Amino acid sequence: MEFGVGAAVIETGAFVGGKLVSRFGKVTKEGGNTFERVISNAELSATQKTGLLRGGRKGNNFFTNRSSLDAKRAQQRLGLDGPLRDARIQFRIKNNVKVSGPRPAASGQSGTAGGGREFSTNGRTEIEIIRITPLKK
C-alpha cells in the first residue's frame, strides 16, 4: 500500500479517547503520522544536522510505527544487520513523500529474524524528531 502522508490521516484516521490515531502510527494534533526508527549515535547526529531521515543518505528509508526499547529485540524484529543500535527516535514526516507499507520486515543477511512492521520511503524525507530514547543493551 502506498499513500501520501497527508492523505493517510483522511483515509485511515479515527478519533479514540479524544486523540486522532491511525493504524499506520500515532497521529499528532498537527495532523502527521509519527513513526519510529532505531539508529546509531552517528546516524542520530547526521539526522539532527540535516533534518532528513538517515541523515539524507540516498536509497530506501525503512522505519516502523513501534519498536522495542531493547536493542537486541529491535534488531531481531526489524531484521537489522551490523552492531546493535543506540537509540530510538520518534519522528513526524514533514514533506509530502510517499510512504509504502505496512509489511513484515525482511530477515537480515546475518540471520536476524525480521517480521516486525515496516514502512519505507524512497528519496528525501524531511522529519521532525519528537523524542529520542536510548536503547537498552
Image (cartoon, rainbow, N blue to C red):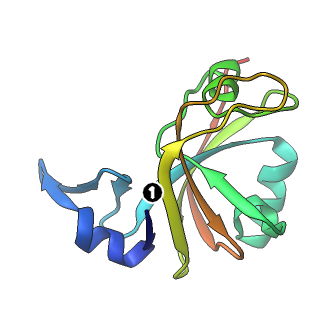
Q: Answer above or below: position of 117 versus 12.
A: above
Q: Is residue 24 left or right of residue 134?
A: left
Observer-nearest residue: 86 or 104?
A: 104
Q: Percent x, y for residue 6?
A: 38, 77
- Image point (63%, 28%), residue name: 74
Locate the N terminus and report the quarter of the image it occupies.
bottom left
- Image point (55%, 27%), residue name: 68
* Residue that extends furthest to the bottom in the rendered view of this protein: 96
Locate the C terminus and report the quarter of the image it occupies.
top right
Observer-nearest residue: 5 or 106?
A: 106
Badge 1 amino acid? Thr
Q: Percent x, y for residue 71?
A: 69, 24
Q: Answer above or below: position of 98 versus 21.
A: below
Instruction: Examine the rendering and report whether any part of residue 30 can be seen.
Output: no
Q: Is residue 53 left or right of residue 128?
A: right
Say what secondary structure mark 1 lies in.
strand
Q: Badge 1 is on which residue?
A: 34
